[in-house]
Structure formats: C-alpha cells, structure tokens
Image (tube, rainbow, N blue to C red):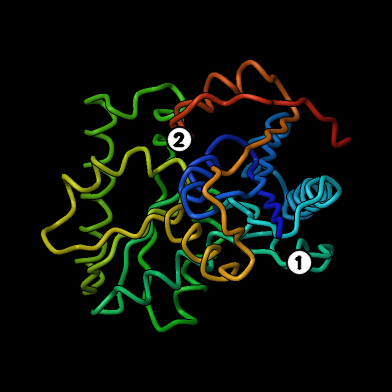
Amino acid sequence: MSLTLGIFDSGFGGLTVLRAMLPLFPGTRCLYLGDTARLPYGSKSRETIARYAVSATQFLENQGADYLVIACNTASALALDEIRAAANVPVLGVIETGAAAAAEVSVTKSAIVLATSATIASHAYVAACAELGVHAQEKACPLLVPLVEEGWAEHSVADQVVRIYLDEALAAAKAASTQPDTLLLGCTHYPLLRPMFERHVPQGMRIVDSADVTAARAAEILATKIPDSIAPATCEFFVTDSVARFAHLGHRFLGRPVNQVTHVDLGD
C-alpha cells in the first residue's frame, strides 16, 4: 500500500507541520508546496487567496497526492471551502484541528489565540472555537514571523517580544473577565518559539501547537492507510520562487536539510 501526502503553505511555516508528520507516516511520500512567489497571502483579497490556494492544491493532486493538508493559516481561514469544493481528495486545515485540540484540553472553555494579523482579522479561530463551546481571546503578533525567518528564534529579542505579546493578551483576557487556561499557537512559525512561550505562560496553562495537532489528526484519520514500513517518509519540495532561499530557510523549520527542491510556475 502506498500513500502520498500533499502539504501546502504560502511559504515556509508549513514545514513545521511536515516536521511533525514525518515520524507518524513511515514509508509515505510527502509532497510540500510553498507558494513563495506570491506570499504573503495575508495582504491579498479573499478571492485572490482562494484562487492561489486552489491552483496550488490542484498542482499537488496532479503530482499524485491522495490527501491534502493545508498547512497555511490564512488559506485555511479564508479559502478552505473553495479548496474542498475543487479537490478530488480529502482536505484537512490547521484551524479546525487547532480549535478542536483547544476544546479538548481546556477546562475553563476559554483560550488565547496568538496568530498573524491576517489570521486574526479573519476571526476564523474565534468562529471555530465557538462552534466547540470555547471562547477565544485573539491577539495579533506581527513581529514573530519576521523574527523567526531572520533566524532569531532563540534570540533574547524574540523572547522579549513573546513575553510582551503574551502579557498583553493575558491583560486583555483579565479585562474581559475571562479565565483562559489554554494558549493556541495559531501560526505555523510559532512552534520554533515554543520554548519561549513555555517560559512565559502562567503556571498550568496548556499550549496547543497547531502543527503538532494537525499532524496527529492526519495520522488518526489515515491510520489504516499508513504503510506498514520501517522506511522513513520521503520528501519532495516544490516552490514558486527561489529554490536556494527555500533550501536555506527551510532547514530552520524542518530541522533537517531540505533537498530535492523544484521550482514550479503556477501562473498568475
């Protein structure tokens, strides 16, 4: 039995989802597409994001993907319905899995969601959490993605910025008379900053990493299709912009060398 997974993101962050998936999918062919020529998606209209995301996922299907993971919060927030309507294979998004995990671990049914400005502006996490009976307090953290991509994920500056954002989010929750016991990391760049979040969250607060829970959910759904193999998963990477830059930055996110990178043109 063979299984081919397609993982899509507008850039590099989705590699943290792939990183979490690799140990769970032995003997599996993994195809990762980073639409690096057209990022950031957050500055585009909903219609444009949907068009980009659909073309990207169709490319992965054409490469043989049996299952698609949308490892992009912006595309999951704004285009998941359009992707599913256009796809011929099952599709999983990071927002639904993150919200479900927060609902599962939260006792107070109140969570803080940290994400990019575009994801927060969509209120997708608020809606997804509300459907599961969880109140989500949102906080945009626009400085974290550039800090991670600059290679400062372990720098004291990043640690200070994480602490400030978290303190502001906790203060807002207190002002709203809510009692969040769960922190949902709503950006696939943020797993690289997890040690800092762990240092600064209040004692007892649970951290939900959308990369880890998305990988776990995909493995649960596909349990009967994962090959019975001792061979590691294989990876193929496709990007719409610089191959060299993706290989260089991608190493930080994947935690291993990024090889077999192919440039592709998805059109306008």
Q: Quadrant of the C terminus?
A: top right
Where residue 70 appears, as percent x and y from the top left, is 63, 54
Mark 2 in CB contact with mark 1 (< 8 angstroms):
no
Residue sitting at 69 percent across and 57 percent down? Answer: 68
Residue sitting at 53 percent across and 68 percent down? Answer: 96
Mark on residue 136?
none
Residue type at mark 2: give it.
Val
Mark on residue 84?
1
Residue sitting at 22 percent across and 68 percent down? Answer: 181
Where residue 251 appears, as percent x and y from the top left, is 49, 26
Query: Horizontal placement of 264 versus 69: left or right?
Result: right
Front residue of 196/28: it is 28
Residue sitting at 30 percent across and 44 percent down? Answer: 194
Q: Is residue 28 above or below residue 131?
A: above
Residue type at mark 1: give it.
Arg
Q: Is residue 150 above or below residue 163?
A: above
Residue under pointer 2: 145
Where residue 216 appears, as percent x and y from the top left, is 46, 62
Look at the numbered disc 2 and give the secondary structure of its residue: helix
